[in-house]
Amino acid sequence: MSATQQRDRAARLAPTDPALALSTARAIHDPWFACQALAWVARFGPEQEFEKIVYESLRVVRVEVDPYRVVAPSAWPIRAIVERDRMKLLPSVIPELLLRAKEIKLLVSRSEAVFLLFQAVFPASREHWFPVLDALRQASTPLINWRQKRNLTDAIMIVRGEDEQLAFEIYDAIDDQKLKQKIVKLWAIPERHLPRKFFWSADA
């Protein structure tokens, strides 16, 4: 069974059999997929085991040398923290992840990793997501790759639902006129943009 399949199996088991899901997650050798699988277990597992498992999820991925492969999958345990309403844990983990993100040399890769982190933490309060948004803006300068442009555009539209003035300020600072025209068209659509889902279940 591949690491992807093991991760998916742990995810399927997490809502109904957290013990088996945990043993499945711990058997995964690839840190990326082990981190995600453990985050699934933390999200749906017993309340008394949450902190232990979510910290394990964050710990297993730190062995990665590539900072991208540390930050990107860490979005899953961050969202687990948010969905289990353990916001008090965020100040001890978000700053460390943002420091690791600064080590990602390719701006497009940094943008991808930080945007995942931004989407994960956005349902929390502004004090938690604003520093991540700021890191995303830094990863968008200069704005040269289509993925950077997509991530910044999506972030602007997500922020718009909470703080339209802030979203406009980010938009106004963009030099790329074609991108600004695209954002204006999106702005005209009243539908609210939401961050991606990280977990699925009947009760999630």
Image (cartoon, helix red, strand yellow):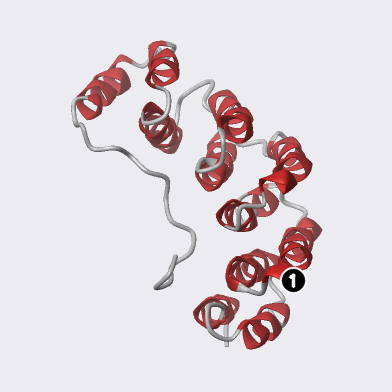
Total marks shown come to 1
- Mark 1, residues whose alpha carbon is within 10 Å: few (<14), some, or many (≥20)? few
Q: Residue at x 68, y 80 (%)?
A: 22
Residue that badge 1 annotates: 49
Front-most of 86 and 132?
86
Residue 185: percent from left, percent from top = 20, 25
Front-most of 40 and 140?
40
> Left or right: where does residue 170 sit relative to residue 190?
right
The answer to whether residue 13 is above or below residue 89 is below
Residue 184: percent from left, percent from top = 24, 21
Q: Residue at x 24, y 19 (%)?
A: 181
Q: Residue at x 61, y 56 (%)?
A: 73
> Left or right: where does residue 190 sit relative to residue 38?
left
- Classify mark 1: helix, strand or loop: helix
Tell me the quarter of the image containing the C terminus: bottom left
Q: Amino acid at mark 1?
A: Glu
